[in-house]
Image (tube, coloured by chain):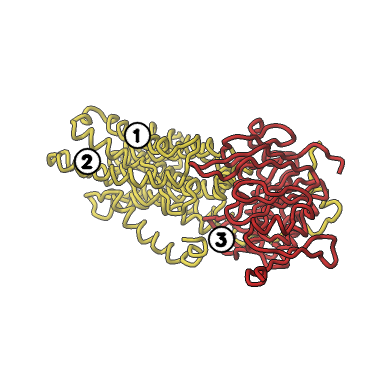
Chain colours: A red, B yellow
Amino acid sequence: MTNVQPAIRGDELVVRVEDKMLLDGVSLSVRGGELVGVVGPNGAGKTTLLKALSGDLPLDSGDVFIDERPLSSFTSRELARRRAVMPQSSYLPFLFTAREVVRMGRAPWEGERGEREHGARLTDYAMGLTDTRDYAVREYPTLSGGEQSRVTFARVLAQETPILLIDEPTAHLDLRHQHLVLQLAQELASEGAAVVAVLHDLNLAAMYSDTALVLHRGRTVAYGPVDEALEPELLAPVFGMAFVLQSHPNLERPMLVPLPASVSHE
Amino acid sequence: MVTRPLAQLRERDPGSDEPARAIPRLRAPLSWGMLVALLAVVVLANLGLGAFEVGVDRIVAILLGKVGIDIGVQYSAAEEAVVWAIRLPRLLLAALVGAGLGVSGAALQGVFRNPLADPSLIGVSSGAAFAVALAVLLGLTSAAVFIQPLVAFVGGLIFTLGIYAFSRSAGRVQMATMLLVGIAVNALLASAISFILSLSDDGALRDIVYWILGSLGGSVWEYAITAGPLILIAIAVLIRQTGALNLLTLGDAEARHLGLKVERSQFIIVSAAALATGAGVAVAGVVGFVGLVAPHLVRLVVGPDHRRLIPGSALSGAILVLGADLGARTIVSPAELPLGVVTAVIGGPVFLYLIHRARRSLASAGW
């Protein structure tokens, strides 16, 4: 990519809650066209990092920049046109339909010329991409967890931003939809989007990210191209388990096969 | 130049963006027509029925006569006095109080993301009741018609702002915290009111209880003219916040990510709801259940979108209070039932029915 300037950058981010360090000096820099997979065990600080990047959490030190401008210099609307955030789960107390929810993703563009038609078209397009069109008129709270999650992803897509921060987009999804969602994220990256995705599954991260950021207890353990960052020796102490590194049979991507404790001790 | 990756993806791979099927519940004209027709019926019933009955033709003739149009129907001076000086101000007040309560309820359910929220949760009704009870105990209210409403109004707003301020931390108001603070303050105020009642003599006791139970019996044009504009302003403000309310139902963080100035919207919404409720409580006393039930009834016909829900709740709130006041006036005529008792008698069962009906969707919504 020719885009040298990072679209979103976190510089030495520190988040402390009482005396617990949730994030201890984590830095990352994401260009347009790049998909960064954030991995790590439970409590490593993945979601905290995403919240810090999206401005949801007050930072104890460090700064977040979007297009090299500090986050605080943006109005909320400007920011909403630059970056979209997908939460881990989205609870809705009222019976909005799936399509109404996706349409809310267009809120930052309201008032623009031609937004009525464009917004409606993009809403339907985003639902098509995420395979949610079939329940466009079903009420969101009545959908299954995986269906809700894809509707939320569609809402985030409909926001039409060049930066996407997505927190475990694959959490409740079946296998096909896990790949569908990450494939979409990858395609958007290839169109110039900067994507930060928190992922639980190391192999999904290995298959779809350009860059991996491995977090452990709020600190960066490894940060770099997936085939360098996802090293079994590095990951073993982080996840408390051993891995064998293989290569995906059809893609030039690493695959990490976990070894159960009984095998790795032999 | 801002990159728009989704638009580029769509150019390369148009896929399918033909419109999805229409949302079935949007039989809008029918449901709006129904609400307006219902409102017209209760309005005419309120003007015509009571100890002294006036026919529909005469009501129309009296009203048109006031703006200088003679439709050739004869009416007596007594009929004119009953309709114009007694029933019309009371009707307007009932409609305004109901609309204010309905809209406040809908807005607060949205901002608290809680379908069980109600205007009383933000302390405005109990704060007003406490202020009135205290004023009666101290003998401060007998002076003029306006003292009691003013005491109620100011008392209600002070408690709402107090609850709001107490729930604020680090520049953000946690709505879940505010809900809990509201419950705690309501409980405190309820016991404070009971304590005041225990100290009061018979006359003061009657005054306070009568006021707390709610009544439009004292309606005069002056009340409609002072409380009315406040309620209408609050409703207008909330109508401007309907887009914000929709986003807020997704959650505070989500709304912020979608470009909403969340704290500002929350403050405006809570203040406007307190204003509408406070002005209503000031002239009518505590009228329960309307703010809770009116939005739920409208959601059944127009759905949860606040752009329709807020105006709809104004209509259904007005209809409910008009209906309840008609009952309060006529059931034990010539005596009157307390309005708050009638709204609770209607509202309670209606709410139970709604819960029964919605059990499955409530369960799936996590309730």
What type is the residue that disc 3 sits on?
Pro
Image height of A53 relative to A126, above or below: above
Question: Horizontally, is B361 left or right of B335 in the view?
Answer: right
Reply above or below: B361 against B164.
below
> Residue A108 or B214: which is nearer the viewer?
A108
Kindly identify which numbered label has been placed on residue B208.
2
Q: Write down the chain letter for disc 1.
A: B
Whether callout 2 and callout 3 share a subunit is answered no
> Residues under labels 2 and 1: Cα distance?
15 Å
Residue A141 is marked as: 3
Q: Quadrant of the C terminus of chain A?
A: bottom right
Instruction: Please tell me which residue is depicted at 77% across the width and 38% down the height of the picture.
Output: A6
Quadrant of the image containing the N terminus of chain A = top right
> Toward the viewer: A134 or A245?
A245
Q: Which mark is residue B153?
A: 1
At 44% from the left edge and 33% from the top edge, which residue is drawn?
B229
* Residue A203, position as x, y percentages in the image: 73, 62
Q: Is residue A6 above or below residue B324?
A: above
- Horizontal placement of B213 versus A83: left or right? left
Element type at marker 3?
helix
| Badge count | 3
Viewer-nearest of labels 2 and 3?
A: 3
Q: Residue at x 76, y 50 (%)?
A: A211
**Residue A158 visible in the current orientation:** no
A243, B52: nearer the viewer: A243
Q: Amino acid at mark 2?
A: Ile
Query: Is residue B35 visible from the viewing direction of this image?
Result: yes
